[in-house]
Image: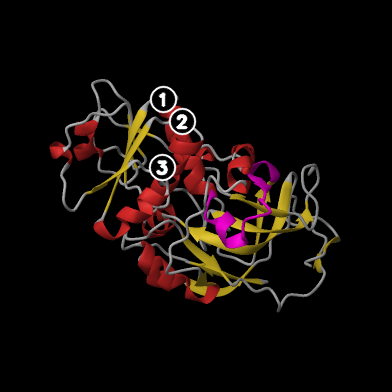
């Protein structure tokens, strides 16, 4: 068994429990990863509150992680034991999510969903990126954004928004970047690369005279923010359903290949991971981390660290079984 956070009924953060959870074994094309850091996302608490995706109880929440490969299933070719990897382990387009998410000491994940962790990033920094950065990238693709166009980013300080601003500047070649945020975060959003930051506590959308080639709404406010878009300009909304008829919902494509494309930008420091200054939170403080995330005030990503697997035997041994969906026979895996 391993330690994990899980819930056995839908409800508020208080339904979460820290306890023993079965230790997984990697199947075909899967890696067994010892989690060193994980990040929380709004989908984690929305899924906990109601049945968004089919899944059996108990459910371990979590999509993002960074860790060390400690075992491999058959057919794995890209990674070896000891490799440091990161990624989003949940394939949203598959119609269901894994029962075992990343708020656990060990997880299994298909090797095609993860990438080598950039050497210059900590586990915490790497864990903060996958879901948010792939969501950000998908929005540009959905909008068919062209180099030289300008962009208006709603929510420039959030987990996705902070990456949209950086990607617009360094990857997609936007000519002019405007982003919204609240008063305390104005300078922070400027530091990410925004040419202009609009304080939404002082200026309303309808007071903005300039119109933009692309409106990227990361907070679900397209019902109001649409007014700053040029006629026929794309409006992307990452919340479902979009709040305005013109807005197009954009989710994400989960892929290790997408993360690999970002390696040069991460390793040169052009693209930076943004961790909320209240964290990283300890593995024992997950409920407190969710409490903060659910306020909607996070700057960047809420990250969980200080995972511990010291109570587990080394090496791990999976016993033989006749169940084809269970761990493979006599499979030894070194944890360190």
How far is the residue under mark 1 from the one under mark 2? 6 Å
Q: Are marks 1 and 2 in contact (CB under 8 Å)?
A: yes
Residue 259 percent across, percent down from the top left: 60, 42
Q: Specify how the rendered protein is coloured.
A: secondary structure
The image shows residue 195, relative to residue 246, as above or below, that is below
Q: Residues within 10 Å of mark 3 (few under 14, many from 20)?
A: many
Disc 1 designates what residue?
148
In this view, the residue in front, 12 or 276, is 276
Residue 182: image quadrant is bottom left
Specify the quadrant of the image occupied by residue 301: bottom left
Q: Which residue is mark 3?
A: 165
Position of residue 66 measured from the top left corner of the image (x, y, whole percent): 62, 57
Q: Which residues are magenta?
A: 111-129
Q: Quadrant of the N terminus?
A: bottom right
Please identify, in this view, whether the residue under mark 1 or under mark 3 is nearer the observer. Answer: 1
The tag earlier along the polypeptide, 1 or 2, is 1
**Residue at figure coordinates x 29%, y 31% from the top left:** 247
Tell me, yes or no, whether the highlighted magenta stretch contains residue 233: no
Residue at (72, 48) in percent of width and height: 30
């Amino acid at each position: 068994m391993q330690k994990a956070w899980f819930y056995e009924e839908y409800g508020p953060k208080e339904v979460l429990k820290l306890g023993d959870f079965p230790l997984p074994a990697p199947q075909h094309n899967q890696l067994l990863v010892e989690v060193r850091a994980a990040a929380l996302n709004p989908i984690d608490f929305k899924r906990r509150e109601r049945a968004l995706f089919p899944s059996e109880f108990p459910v371990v929440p979590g999509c993002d992680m960074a860790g060390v490969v400690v075992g491999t299933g058959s057919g794995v070719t890209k990674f070896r034991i000891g490799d440091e990897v990161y990624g989003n382990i949940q394939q949203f387009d598959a119609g269901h999510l894994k029962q075992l998410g990343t708020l656990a000491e060990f997880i299994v994940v298909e090797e095609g969903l993860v990438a080598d962790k950039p050497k210059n990033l900590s586990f915490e920094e790497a864990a903060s990126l996958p879901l948010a950065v792939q969501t950000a990238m998908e929005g540009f693709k959905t909008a068919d954004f062209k180099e030289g166009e300008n962009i208006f980013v709603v929510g420039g300080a959030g987990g996705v928004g902070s990456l949209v601003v950086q990607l617009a500047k360094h990857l997609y070649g936007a000519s002019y970047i405007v982003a919204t945020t609240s008063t305390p975060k104005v300078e922070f959003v400027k530091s990410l690369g925004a040419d202009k930051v609009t304080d939404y506590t002082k200026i309303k959308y309808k007071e903005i005279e300039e119109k933009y080639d692309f409106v990227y709404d990361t907070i679900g406010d397209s019902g109001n923010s649409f007014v700053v878009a040029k006629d026929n300009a794309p409006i992307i909304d990452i919340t479902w359903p979009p709040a305005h008829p013109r807005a197009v919902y954009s989710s994400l494509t989960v892929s290790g290949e997408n993360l690999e494309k970002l390696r040069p930008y991460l390793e040169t420091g052009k693209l930076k991971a943004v961790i909320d200054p209240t964290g990283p939170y300890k593995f024992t403080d997950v409920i407190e981390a969710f409490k903060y995330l659910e306020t909607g005030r996070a700057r960047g990503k809420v990250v969980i660290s200080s995972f511990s697997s010291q109570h587990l035997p080394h090496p791990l041994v999976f016993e033989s079984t006749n169940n084809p969906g269970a761990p493979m026979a006599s499979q030894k895996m070194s944890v360190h």
